Image (cartoon, rainbow, N blue to C red):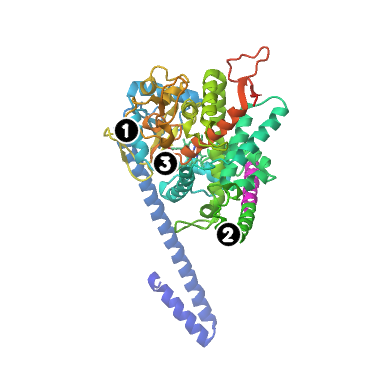
Amino acid sequence: MSSPCKLPNKLMSFLFSSSKSGYSSCDSEESSRLLKDYATWEFNAFLWISLVTITALSLEKVFKLFRLWAKARRIAGPPSSSFFGHKNFGSRDNFIDLLSKLHSKYGSVFKLWLGPTQLLVSIKDPELIKDMLLKAEDKLPFSGKAFRLAFGRSNLFFCSYDQAQKRRESLASQLNEKLRGRADIISKDVINCIMERLDEILGKGSVDCKLVSQHMAFTILGTTLFGDTFLAWSKATFYEELLMMIAKDASFWASYRVTPFWRHGFWTYQYLCTKLKYLTQDIIQQCRKNCKLFHHVDHSSNDETMKYGLKSASSMSPFGIVMPYKFFSREVDGHLIAKEEPYGNVTGMMFHGCITTASLIANILERLVADPEIQDKIYSEIVMARQGSAKDDQNVGKMLLLLATIYESARLLPPGPLLQRCSLKDDLKLKNGVIIPAGAVLVVPVHLLQMDDANWGSDASKFNPYRFLSKVGEVSDSVHLPFTEVAENAVDHTENKFILNDPNENAAFLPFGSGIRACVGQEFVIHGVATLFVSLLERYEVKRQSTPGNDPKSSNSEIVFVRRSS
Ligand code: HEM
């Protein structure tokens, strides 16, 4: 039999010769034999290459696993109870309790095997956490998967930092640009629209605090991304409902290792996700149309603008402060982006922003209802800040008690999921010398940390906004204030001068995360929610509904908005 490496040449020469001299039966036998040999040779080569590749990949996996086990041995923690399968940790509260107990036993860093290949490392020391959050760049593939499954490709919430970095920077620079301008973070029109909607809901009777907060957050986020176009969009209510329905199931469907195509519920979920995508496309198209119109009007009115030195009012803009050119062009800072990505990013932001902002608003309302004294003081602060300033001035920087109340409510937010990170490629060395192997899941039990007396004093579990305020002269020079330019003028009602501490100075303040993957929207949200509460508290007093049999201290009882006499 001819040597296999000569086969292709032979085959080629045969094909050429046969085309010149025509077919004989002998030639055709020879040709079919050659073709057969060639096919066998190709098939064998394919099998060998597959075998070598699979063996190399398996060896790499086994090697990584041994490396993980070897490196994890050096971290304190309970031994793995079972080599096979998962350990059942019960509910989320049970799991947090378990972490708390293990921290008391093993110190500020310990490991916990979730399975033979899944290593979790929990960190509770604020300084080590700060160090880790600066160094660990990646997130768990799970969170990226939940976003991708629901909203399509999204680089903003991608697990690998390399992929997310450009979009993060682009979003952060747009938000910060607006914040630096201090103007109209939430425009007067948006606030009016929110108040009108609230009046409408109040007219119908009882108020569900969570639902009202959700509507408010949704309007704020929608107008931030899509501008005033969003206020006139007829499908906004449907969009909100759909987003919330998807939010309920997103983690569940993402928790499957293999996408569960066989489950009917999964297809219903996918149907809702597709509907949401079409709605996102619809609002984006509306924005584009308005943008063209806007540019047209803008160009034609340019002469007038120049002549009278007028600037176009920001409320006229059809876009919000984030989205336009950067998010819907195919290129961001020289990087070409996939066609799907802008929709994924925008819907992902709506999803994350609405859920987190809604829960913050609801939490602030609950705190104000439970503490009417603080509510009264904030109201006086608003009235005082308004005196002497223009009627539409929305500079919330002067309202230090309000801002401190927002920080404190964020600190006391009910326990969210753990803050999680990982380093996908490299091992991570913490400043206490502990080496965390690449691929380990790093978690920060945020709630434990934010309720820890060691970090916040003996009243850590109590609502006390004053912990974020310092008397003038008592604050250290190292404290940088986010609203510096106005903080100096702030006066508390006890007639002492107070200034607002930067909450991020305390490494245990983590409602927005910290470090390299910290929340991009933190300052925007604080500023936006403060603007909302200025208008809300100017108009209403929030109280607990006092119906017979209703425990006034229970946080489940309904809230009423009592209109203030103007
Ligand atoms: C009360 C409201 C909000 C809270 C409590 C919140 C909280 C968080 C937290 C805890 C993270 C993870 C941080 C980390 O791992 O260190 C995060 C990430 C993020 N947040 Fe927020 N957020 C809020 C609102 C917003 C808003 C309104 C936006 C956008 C306009 C936004 C944009 C983002 C982005 C883009 C990320 C992903 C960062 C990344 O993975 O690289 N957030 N947020």
**Mark in front: 2 vs 3:** 2
The answer to whether residue 246 is seen in the rendering is no
**Residues at circles 1 and 2 in contact by the CB criterion of under 8 Å:** no
Q: Which residue is mark 3?
A: 517
How far apart marks 2 and 3 lie (CA) works out to 41 Å
Image quadrant for the C terminus?
A: top right
In the displayed image of the protein, which residue is found farthest to the top?
549
Residue 285 placement (x, y as % from top left): 63, 54
How far apart marks 1 and 3 lie (CA) works out to 24 Å
Q: Looking at the image, tell me whether mark 2 or mark 3 is earlier in sequence order.
A: 2
**Residues at circles 2 and 3 in contact by the CB criterion of under 8 Å:** no
**Mark in front: 1 vs 2:** 2
* Quadrant position of residue 172: top left
Numbered tag placed on residue 302 in the rendering: 2
User: Which amino acid does the dot numbered 1 rest on?
Assistant: Ser
Residue 282 belongs to magenta span: yes
Q: Which residue is mark 1?
A: 478
Left or right, 254 with reference to 197: left
Mark 3: secondary structure = helix
Q: Label 1: few (<14), some or many (≥20) within 10 Å?
A: few
**Residues at circles 1 and 3 in contact by the CB criterion of under 8 Å:** no
Residue 476 placement (x, y as % from top left): 32, 29
Residue 306 placement (x, y as % from top left): 55, 58
How far apart marks 1 and 2 lie (CA) works out to 46 Å
Where is 544 relative to 410, above or below? above
Q: In percent of the image, x 32 and y 40: which residue is there?
A: 428
User: As rendered, which of 554 and 383 lies closer to the eye?
Assistant: 383
Mark 2: secondary structure = helix
User: As rendered, which of 221 and 253 lies closer to the eye?
Assistant: 221
Q: Main secondary structure of the magenta part?
A: helix
Mark 1: secondary structure = loop
